């Protein structure tokens, strides 16, 4: 066997140096790439006057809509109208079973006849007793008793007559009659149902004036109330209509907010135009004219910390900073700014969602479109 030769040993300093280099190579990180400069669109601030327009969606409703109901209870035997039917004044809409009420009417009539017969009898007796009193055969006390009996009989007769009249009316109330012409907008009871007095059976929108009904938020109530009773102050555009908007007058604005929606119900009188019940429409009106306002795109304004903010560009350093502004309203797709910016300042209108304070940016260069070949 050949003897094993010893390996050549490396110097200790070389081994330690290689170890340190390996550790440093493992711990070192690549240098971060510089953040690209964002490109933004901007707009120079200029002021002018503006009249903001407010729009709300609403519905066409009848000025008067009533819920017709019976004045007595009973079983609904028939209903002669359906949803959407036109009704004339005096037309019979529904009928109750009158059997029990007719029996009550007959009983009241019998009671009236009995009271009449009793009154006739005591009246004849009084006449005879007056003759006897004049001849001295009876005393004054007996005559007074007969006169009192006649008064009691008269009261009983009046009561029976009134009761008979009430029962007669009750029988007539089994026929539900329309008080005025209109259109049936709802049906609340079907034949065979036992309804109580006052239970709605049919909803009737009366013919005549029509209203545009819409809801106003709390922050706009004051400005809308200023338009109350001003002829033609509102413009109503019917859904699907191609003609000119219909002029309307705000005739009513609720004094209290709806507990659910926290909005105020407003009703506008339509002065002209062919409208249909339930038709969707949009009502528009001009708010108070404002001076020294700036129009900015909606995308230029963001919400930060409960404030409306725009981003201003410093042309010298090409950096941006947030600037709180006061919003005066809207004009279509534009925001009306009444304070916070000065004429000549440059506002970022696109790319605001990625900006931070002090960020360097560059203006967006519109691409040059090639000329169309002939």
Image (cartoon, grey):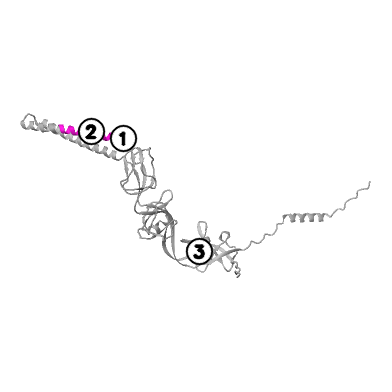
**Mark 2 lies on residue:** 111
What secondary structure predominates along the stretch shown in magenta?
helix
**Residue with the most extreme left position:** 135
Q: Residues within 10 Å of mark 1 (few under 14, many from 20)?
A: few
Identify the image quadrant of residue 285.
bottom left
Q: Residue at x 24, y 37 (%)?
A: 164
Contact flag, marks 2 and 1 (Cβ < 8 Å): no
- Residue 296, which numbered label? 3
- In-image side of 225 versus 155 (left or right): right
**Which segment is the magenta one?**
99-121
The picture places residue 32, in percent across and down from the top left corner, at 67, 59
User: Which one is in front, 169 or 219?
Assistant: 169
Q: Residue at x 24, y 38 (%)?
A: 165
Quadrant where the C terminus is found in the figure? bottom right
Q: Earlier in the sequence, mark 2 or mark 1?
A: 1
Mark whose residue sits in front, 2 or 1: 1
Between 93 and 45, the one lying in front of the other is 93
- For label 3, the SS is strand
User: Which circle, 1 or 3, is nearer the viewer?
Assistant: 1
Q: Which residue is mark 1?
A: 99
From the top left corner, tell me how far across and down residue 9 is, in percent. Answer: 86, 53
Q: CA distance from mark 2 to mark 1?
A: 19 Å
Residue 115: in magenta span: yes
């Amino acid at each position: 066997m050949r003897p094993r030769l010893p390996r050549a040993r490396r110097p200790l300093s070389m081994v330690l140096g290689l170890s340190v280099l390996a550790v440093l190579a493992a711990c070192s990180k690549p240098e971060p790439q510089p953040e690209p400069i964002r490109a933004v669109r901007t707009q120079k601030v200029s002021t002018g006057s503006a009249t903001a327009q407010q729009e709300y969606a609403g519905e066409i409703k009848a000025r008067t809509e009533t819920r017709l109901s019976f004045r007595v209870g009973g079983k609904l035997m028939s209903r002669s109208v359906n949803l959407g039917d036109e009704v004339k004044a005096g037309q019979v809409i529904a009928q109750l079973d009158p059997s029990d009420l007719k029996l009550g009417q007959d009983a009241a009539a019998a009671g009236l006849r009995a009271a009449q017969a009793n009154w006739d009898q005591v009246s004849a007796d009084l006449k005879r007793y007056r003759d006897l009193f004049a001849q001295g055969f009876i005393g004054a006390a007996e005559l007074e008793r007969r006169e009192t009996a006649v008064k009691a009989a008269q009261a009983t007769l009046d009561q029976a007559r009134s009761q008979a009249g009430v029962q007669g009316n009750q029988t007539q109330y089994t026929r539900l009659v329309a008080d005025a012409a209109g259109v049936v907008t709802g049906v609340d009871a079907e034949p065979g149902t036992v309804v109580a007095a006052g239970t709605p059976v049919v909803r009737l929108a009366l013919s005549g004036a029509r209203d545009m009904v819409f809801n106003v938020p709390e922050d706009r109530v004051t400005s809308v109330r200023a338009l109350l009773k001003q002829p033609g102050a509102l413009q109503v555009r019917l859904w699907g209509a191609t003609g000119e908007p219909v002029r309307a007058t705000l005739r009513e604005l609720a004094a209290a907010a709806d507990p659910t929606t926290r909005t105020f119900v407003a009703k506008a009188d339509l002065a002209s135009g062919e409208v249909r019940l339930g038709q969707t429409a949009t009502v528009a009106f001009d708010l108070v004219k404002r001076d020294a306002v700036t129009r900015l795109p909606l995308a230029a304004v963001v919400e930060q910390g409960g404030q409306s903010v725009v981003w201003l560009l410093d042309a010298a350093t090409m950096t941006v900073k947030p600037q709180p502004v006061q919003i005066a309203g809207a004009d279509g797709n534009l925001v009306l700014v009444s304070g916070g910016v000065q004429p000549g300042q440059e506002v970022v209108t696109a790319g605001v969602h990625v900006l931070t304070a002090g960020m360097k940016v560059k203006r967006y260069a519109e691409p040059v479109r090639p000329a169309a070949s002939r």
